[in-house]
């Protein structure tokens, strides 16, 4: 492989190493202003937008054991990587793409597992991380709360029976 191509493969590979996910986008018909706007939005989430050559991306992904199918690597391709919160980045991408109606999400990969367009959309619909943590904590607390109610219900029920019995005796 030529030195220039190896340099590009290494550069794309370093981008892929930055995060556990990569989203692929078709950026055909996108203006420079739109690209800069998208990059600013993604920067708020710690993510980056890079235009790449399909062959270079294929080689860099293969070296990292990410098997990207050929149908994802047709036409102009850009990658979105970085940031710790993949659902927030997917949500930002989906919102931007719907507003501009020029860009399309092709798919992606999350921890070396392929994602379809629908799966990226589902990822975007996940609630924020703080909400998920609160919901999980609520699930952990729920059985304990129910157990306390059951334990309290037994003496309360006994008291109700005794109270009713004493009222009958009077």
Image (tube, rainbow, N blue to C red):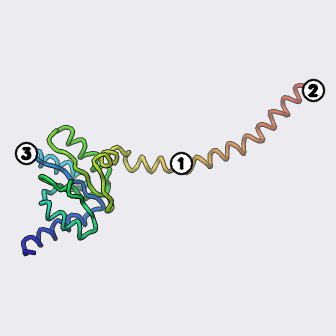
Which residue does the numbered mark 2 point to in the structure image?
Answer: 169
Please give the name of the residue rendered at 57% of the width and 49% of the height, measured from the top-left corner: 141
Mark 3 or mark 2, which has the lower sequence index?
Answer: 3
Q: Which mark is residue 139?
A: 1
48 up-or-down from 8: above or below: above
Question: Which label sits in the foreground, 3 or 2?
Answer: 3
35 up-or-down from 153: above or below: below
Q: Position of residue 156 (x, y in %)?
A: 76, 38
Whether residues under marks 1 and 2 lie with C-beta atoms below 8 angstroms apart, the answer is no
In the picture as drawn, the residue positioned furthest to the right comes out as: 169
Name the one closer to the observer, 97 or 70.
Answer: 70
Q: Position of residue 159 (x, y in %)?
A: 81, 36
Quarter of the image for the C terminus: give it.
top right
Q: Which mark is residue 31?
A: 3
117 up-or-down from 63: above or below: above
At label 1, counting other C-alpha atoms closer than 10 Å, the crowd grade (few under 14, some 14-19, many 20 or more) is: few
Q: Is residue 87 left or right of residue 155?
A: left
In three-dimensional space, the C-alpha distance between marks 3 and 2, rounded to whole angstroms, equals 88 Å
In three-dimensional space, the C-alpha distance between marks 1 and 3, rounded to whole angstroms, equals 46 Å
Please give the name of the residue rendered at 26% of the width and 69% of the height, measured from the top-left corner: 64
At label 2, counting other C-alpha atoms closer than 10 Å, the crowd grade (few under 14, some 14-19, many 20 or more) is: few
Please give the name of the residue rendered at 18% of the width and 56% of the height, measured from the top-left corner: 73
Q: Which mark is residue 107?
A: none
């Amino acid at each position: 492989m030529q030195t220039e191509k190896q340099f590009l493969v290494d550069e794309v590979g370093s981008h892929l190493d930055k995060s556990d996910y990569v989203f692929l986008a078709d950026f055909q018909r996108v203006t420079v202003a739109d690209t800069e706007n998208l990059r600013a939005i993604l920067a708020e989430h710690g993510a980056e937008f890079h235009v790449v050559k399909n062959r270079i991306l294929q080689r860099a992904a293969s070296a990292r054991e990410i098997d990207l199918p050929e149908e994802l690597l047709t036409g102009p391709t850009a990658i979105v990587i970085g940031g710790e919160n993949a659902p927030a980045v997917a949500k930002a991408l989906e919102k931007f793409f719907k507003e501009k109606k020029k860009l399309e999400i092709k798919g992606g990969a999350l921890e070396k597992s392929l994602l379809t367009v629908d799966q990226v959309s589902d990822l975007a619909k996940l609630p924020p991380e703080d909400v998920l943590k609160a919901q999980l904590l609520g699930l952990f607390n729920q059985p304990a709360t129910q157990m306390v109610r059951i334990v309290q219900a037994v003496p309360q029920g006994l008291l109700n029976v005794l109270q009713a019995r004493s009222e009958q005796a009077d």
